[in-house]
């Protein structure tokens, strides 16, 4: 260990960390010795940010180790946090030490320093605070395979004693994990302590891989239902906590994961652990929505506060659209929560709308919001006469930002009936509220008037390329005059930039956009996938021939946002390259979701769109 008196003996200014020169490290280490807990806490936070930044270590990290070890033993507080900083600094894959790049690397230097100071840190294994003991065990685990033989034997003996005698079950479980790092096997699955059995089952699942043995699943289901009452579920050297490891492992085996989630939820869904596990499985695996929704509904009565309950209801609202016929029990439950007088009513009503329950429409009209109106328009397009006046009223009241965008977007499912809202759309253009989507809506279903034409002409001259493109195309849709629109797009294309943002607007012009081809064709070879994709799509719209577009689109197709758009564009050509069929079969038959989504999106799951497109194209001749 090295005391703060020795800080000036290190050339910190010649070392670097995440933010450049490490000359601020001595000041931060000295702050650890302050009696002011807030000052010391800020110093720990800063050290986590610069010598260990988002999992990366730096040349300044290793020289800090002996000083941090001294602070653990002699500073007035934050011992557990400092021990955890040492543990994560030394994080490495044991296989890395065989790499030719290991000697001389920053992490190798950290591990060398930590092995040298470890004897000085071993008293922390007997500390009176459970959090310090648990953090110290993680330090030991971080360098277990690197310890010299003599030190190794004494460390194992001390950890073995903790495993046998520590009064805190969570500490015993940690000690068992550390013993396995030293190659020691224990009969932990037979332990009388649930915490030890759970940790042993987790290790067993990691070793076996999915599908997990029924014996391990049974232990995890029973002993994992209630987490340790402490707040020190520190990560191990791979920076994941036990709860995170359990969720990750169980998500890899959906049958086991759903079995465990059901048991945890039945036991009270403490900390919403069962619910989160079920949600992760739905997001990771296809066709699990019926089981997951059943579990989430069962979890609702167990949520401890309105915030947790609202979160579960939002998840139900996201996945309920995947059920062809949501059950009456689920709809009744949602209807009951939608009538609540707290923050749960909104997400419950949104879920009820997405379940296509007719009772939801009346509640939306009584308690409208932009999100609810947009969802109701999607699921009840036949209710235009009831919804359009409310949407108009909300727009006229001055909705801005995402709310205004959602309200204008809510008009799209109503077709020509949305013309009733033209005064509000005109006002959106005038005031710049949701102007891009307002211009598009006017182009789709608006009525040509001198005022609208003038507004669109002015908007087409905007410095916002997306607004300029949308307004120019809308003007063409209303007037049939392509000249001004082509002039706008020639200016946009010559300016470069994010051309895919506005190339996708060209579809309504079709062959009328042919004068733009000399500007579009060079983009077919762009090094940016989004630009290549948009150029190929536009080329097909303009020429009516898919020959140039198909090879480009097929090459971009992948389980990514741009790859999904390319697949949609390819589907529009009506042609499928034969060598793309294996990829399409992989998209369609994959049991795993290939595209992720946020449960808050409310626009359907992109993975479902990917699978549907793949099925459609595979069925094409």
Image: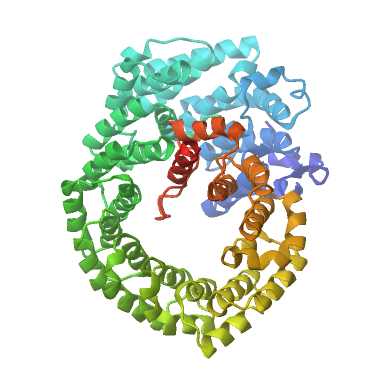
Rendered image coloring scheme: rainbow
Q: Tell me what residue is drawn at x 39 percent, y 15 percent.
A: 164
Q: Tell me what residue is drawn at x 29 percent, y 63 percent.
A: 380
Position above or below: 621 against 354: above
Horizontally, residue 439 falls left or right of residue 370, namely: right
Placement of the N terminus among the 4 image quadrants: top right
Residue 146, percent across and down? Answer: 65, 17
* Image quadrant where residue 61 sits: top right
Q: Tell me what residue is drawn at x 56 percent, y 85 percent.
A: 453
Horizontally, residue 439 falls left or right of residue 16, namely: left
Position above or below: 177 against 418: above
Residue 108 visible, this orientation: yes
The residue lying toward the viewer, choosing from 344 and 561, is 561
Residue 53 visible, this orientation: no
The residue lying toward the viewer, choosing from 615 and 316, is 615
Q: Residue furthest bottom?
A: 450
The residue lying toward the viewer, choosing from 468 and 110, is 468
The residue lying toward the viewer, choosing from 139 and 487, is 487
Q: How many marks?
A: 0
Horizontally, residue 167 falls left or right of residue 618, namely: left
Residue 220, percent across and down? Answer: 33, 24
Residue 166, percent across and down? Answer: 38, 22
Residue 412, percent across and down? Answer: 41, 68
């Amino acid at each position: 260990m090295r005391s703060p008196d020795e800080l000036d003996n290190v050339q910190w200014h010649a070392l670097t960390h995440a933010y450049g020169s490490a000359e601020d490290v001595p000041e931060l280490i000295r702050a650890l010795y302050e009696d002011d807990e807030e000052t010391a806490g800020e110093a720990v936070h800063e050290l986590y940010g610069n010598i260990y930044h988002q999992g990366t270590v730096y040349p300044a990290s290793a020289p800090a180790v002996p000083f941090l070890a001294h602070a653990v033993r002699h500073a007035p507080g934050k011992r557990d946090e400092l021990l955890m900083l040492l543990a994560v600094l030394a994080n490495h894959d044991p296989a890395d030490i065989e790499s030719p790049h290991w000697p001389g690397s920053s992490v190798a230097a950290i591990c060398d320093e930590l092995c040298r100071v470890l004897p000085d840190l071993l008293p922390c294994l007997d500390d009176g605070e459970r959090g310090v003991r648990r953090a110290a065990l993680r330090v030991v685990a971080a360098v277990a395979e690197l310890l010299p033989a003599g030190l190794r034997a004494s460390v194992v003996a001390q950890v073995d004693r903790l495993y046998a005698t520590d009064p805190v079950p969570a500490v015993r479980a940690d000690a068992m994990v550390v013993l396995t790092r030293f190659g020691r096997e224990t009969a932990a699955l037979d332990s009388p302590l649930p915490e030890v059995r759970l940790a042993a089952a987790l290790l067993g699942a990691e070793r076996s891989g999915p599908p997990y043995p029924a014996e391990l699943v049974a232990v995890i289901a029973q002993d994992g239902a209630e987490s340790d009452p402490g707040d020190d579920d520190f990560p191990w050297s791979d920076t994941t906590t036990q709860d995170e490891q359990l969720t990750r492992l169980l998500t890899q085996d959906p049958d086991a994961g759903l079995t465990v989630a059901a048991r945890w939820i039945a036991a009270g869904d403490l900390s919403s652990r069962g619910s989160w596990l079920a949600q992760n499985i739905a997001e990771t695996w296809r066709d699990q929505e019926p089981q997951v929704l059943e579990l989430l509904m069962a979890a609702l009565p167990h949520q401890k506060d309105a915030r947790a309950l609202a979160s579960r209801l939002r998840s139900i609202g996201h996945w309920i659209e995947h059920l062809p016929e949501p059950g009456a029990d689920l709809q009744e439950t949602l209807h009951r929560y939608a009538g609540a007088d707290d923050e749960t009513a909104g997400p419950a009503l949104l879920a009820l709308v997405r379940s296509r329950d007719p009772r939801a429409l009346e509640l939306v009209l009584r308690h409208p919001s932009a999100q609810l109106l947009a969802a109701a328009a999607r699921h009840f397009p036949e209710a235009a006469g009831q919804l359009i006046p409310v949407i108009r009223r909300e727009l006229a009241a001055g909705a801005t930002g995402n709310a205004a965008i959602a309200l204008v977007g809510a008009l799209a499912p109503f077709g020509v009936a949305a013309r009733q809202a033209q005064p509000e759309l005109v006002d959106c253009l005038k005031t710049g509220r949701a102007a891009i989507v307002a211009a598009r809506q006017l182009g789709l279903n608006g009525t040509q008037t001198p005022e609208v034409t003038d507004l669109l002409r002015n908007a087409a001259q905007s410095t916002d390329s997306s607004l300029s493109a949308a307004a120019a195309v809308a003007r063409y849709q209303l007037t049939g005059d392509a000249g001004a629109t082509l002039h706008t797009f020639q200016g946009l294309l010559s300016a470069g930039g994010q051309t895919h943002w506005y190339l996708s607007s060209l579809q309504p012009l079709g062959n009328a956009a042919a004068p733009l081809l000399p500007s579009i064709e060079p983009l077919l070879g762009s090094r940016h996938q989004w630009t290549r994709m948009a150029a190929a799509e536009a080329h097909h719209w303009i020429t009516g021939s898919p020959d140039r577009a198909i090879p480009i689109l097929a090459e971009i197709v992948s389980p990514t946002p741009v790859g999904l758009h390319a697949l949609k564009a390819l589907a529009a050509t009506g042609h499928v390259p034969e060598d793309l069929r294996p990829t399409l079969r992989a998209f369609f038959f994959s049991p795993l979701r290939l595209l992720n989504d946020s449960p808050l999106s409310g626009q359907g799951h992109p993975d479902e769109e990917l699978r549907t497109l793949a099925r459609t194209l595979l069925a094409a001749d």
